[in-house]
Image: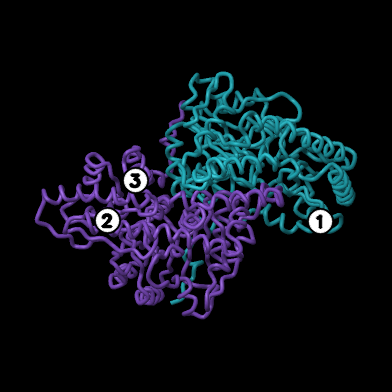
Chain colours: A purple, B cyan
Amino acid sequence: METTWTDRYAQRTRGMSGSAIRELLKLTAQPDVISFAGGLPAPDVFPVEAFDEASQKVLREHGSTALQYSTTEGYQPLRELIAGMMSEDGFEVDPDQVLITHGSQQALDLFGKIFINPGDHVAVERPTFLGALQAWKAYQAEYLTIPVDDDGMRVDELEEVLRHGPKFLYTMPTFHNPAGVTLSAERRETLLELADRYGVPLVEDDPYSKLRYSGQPQSPLVALDARGRGSTGEGDVLYLGTFSKTLSPGLRLGWALAPPDVIRRMVQAKQGADLHTSTFTQMVAYEVARDGFIDEHAERIRSVYRERRDAMLSAIEANFPEGVQWTHPEGGLFLWVTLPEAVDAAELLETAVETEKVAFVPGHTLDPTERIRNTMRLNFSYANVELIQDGMERLGRVLERVLDERAPATAQASY
Amino acid sequence: METTWTDRYAQRTRGMSGSAIRELLKLTAQPDVISFAGGLPAPDVFPVEAFDEASQKVLREHGSTALQYSTTEGYQPLRELIAGMMSEDGFEVDPDQVLITHGSQQALDLFGKIFINPGDHVAVERPTFLGALQAWKAYQAEYLTIPVDDDGMRVDELEEVLRHGPKFLYTMPTFHNPAGVTLSAERRETLLELADRYGVPLVEDDPYSKLRYSGQPQSPLVALDARGRGSTGEGDVLYLGTFSKTLSPGLRLGWALAPPDVIRRMVQAKQGADLHTSTFTQMVAYEVARDGFIDEHAERIRSVYRERRDAMLSAIEANFPEGVQWTHPEGGLFLWVTLPEAVDAAELLETAVETEKVAFVPGHTLDPTERIRNTMRLNFSYANVELIQDGMERLGRVLERVLDERAPATAQASY
């Protein structure tokens, strides 16, 4: 009897699909296309020399430790460094509450694994981070969505969703991917208060907070929540951080910050998932990041990305036709463009690649309801200023032509 | 309302527990205890200098690639190297059928994720590899077990299990962990034939095949299966390999070999689980392993481990009392000891640590039925010859005392 593997897949596998963006990146990966579709850090800001020094140091001084099995929880000095980085006034992080993960994508997966039963509801922003949707699809989550605007999540629409009793609410409050917006201080308080009132815990994804180019820093929800209750060990917020945007995404190093019992369960789940994160990469990352390097280096990254963000905003302003709206991010890697309602961004992408060799991510791929058809995500970290200007001119020309065909039309901001 | 995280766990989380062995290792990790409980490679055989050279080369020549995001499938030159390593007469491996995983533990997890529905049966050997049980507990698998003896899985007891229609059968045919035995050539044929007849696919875990110290090499099941059907792309065997025992376990690099549609599904699952395996470690491992280094280096590892295996077998022979039986592994890291039936190895462990400062893994932790109480696993790769001799003398004294108390008794080999 020949085995038919496809007949043997689990229920959950039927709901899985590849990342729409990864597929799209393949399509747009022609050498002459200027692409703003990816979410890649600029490789020229990677601290390659610091990694070279750190690798040598680790291998020469602790070679046999670096290549050996290690604990599931993570390399203790790295946990301590993270706890120190995250602690702020009134919020002291215990290293034992930090779990090192293989990229923060793994923390999303572990949260899903320990919390989500098939059919459970999870509340997310609309649009939201594709990686979270992909992680939780495998656990057969259903989604409730809350729209965002220029000040982040629309907390006035929150109660409606919380009343349905989602397992947790997932949010990226600072430099949202894909929307590029930041939750205001006032809304942070409202969000925490409502989540507390309805007993719905929060999952805060915070990959970009060190990449602020303008405006005032905001405390993460996990710190605000801890202040409110005067205790730091048993909060209502699970937090995800990463070294992907400050050191290197290719290393796959992130972390989760969670109450002790949740960490204990995540450790059990991670033992079954991959035993532990690479000892070598953890030790190298620790050697690179320590003694304040990460803050110094973030300053260098900010100066590069700030210039690119500014270049993109100016070029959009100069080249996009009337009737198009866009966000003005204070940090992160992305901005979000809303087109007149009649424009389908997926169709626009085809035209853009064909006629002007320029690419972006159509917004419906980042919306679990797939309703928002007239939006697009633009990345400003990867291409240099010259390419950004060239690319926005190309995109402007495509938009001019498409909107001309449909005129008159005005965009109603849509996230 | 205060959130109680524990009320929110998914069904599957209730079945999870920490690794009994990891807990046990903590208990026995006193500096004066000689422990044969772990499964650690000897750190003195790690090729630290080769890693140092490779890291420098990778960072200096391809730094920005090594630190950047990469494909979920894995670093292409590494996939090609693995495909080359695995190909043999009549079995040509296509690199596209190789998925790089974060240790082979991750391949176990991904198999579970795409194949196991809650309550599905999985057939495993008794005893079996703890990591597999841990990975699939998270997907709520139930187990059917097949005993092993000196020639590996008891194929005469196989049909009984296959008749129950397990989702797949998991086996470690070569240098079994924990039993230390190898499936004979004849039984390999019988296993493939019966699995084919009942339409039950196989998952072959093969971490140790390069660590053979004596006896004749055996082809892996995946190669035998391909020969039998004359095609290599669509076999009935999923295969797991790893660099943990030949290069470094701390890197977390393994691979799965599977038919194209299974690879496609695993890639989707891995995107949600951790996006991709560390680009840096993949590139470094490729630079270390290439140009035949891995075979040269395996020869060095074999010479160290062969001596330790021999030392352990001699010391057991010299020190263990009558009524105790043990396996004579031709490779791998472990041997398996069967005590008279009345002896509970978990209790024995307590006595051994207390009175003689020596530790091992009691066998019931490696048996999903937890029935086998009178067995223990001994690791011979980590401690040096002197410690092995000292340790077996200590363990011999403990056994003498315990068996004296219960005499007369004779061991009936039990796996």
* Marks 3, 2: nearer the viewer: 2
Which chain does the numbered disc 2 sit on?
A: A
Up the image or down, A344 lies above or below A193; here it is above
Q: Earlier in the sequence, mark 3 or mark 2?
A: 3
**Residue B152 shows up from this direction:** no
Horizontal side of B32 relative to B54 (left or right) equals right
Amino acid carrying label 1: it is Val
Query: What secondary structure is marked by label 1?
Result: helix
Host chain of mark 1: B
Which residue in the protein does label 2 denote?
Answer: A315
Residue at (31%, 50%) from the top-left corner?
A365
Q: Which label number is shown at residue B353?
A: 1
Q: Where residue A71 sits in the image (x, y, percent)? A: 64, 55
| Residue A163 placement (x, y as % from top left) | 33, 70
| Image quarter of the C terminus of chain B | top right
**Tag 2 near tag 1, CB within 8 Å:** no
In what element is the residue under mark 2? helix
Q: Which mark is residue A20?
A: 3
Q: Residue at x 60, y 25 (%)?
A: B190
Q: Residue furthest front?
A: A386
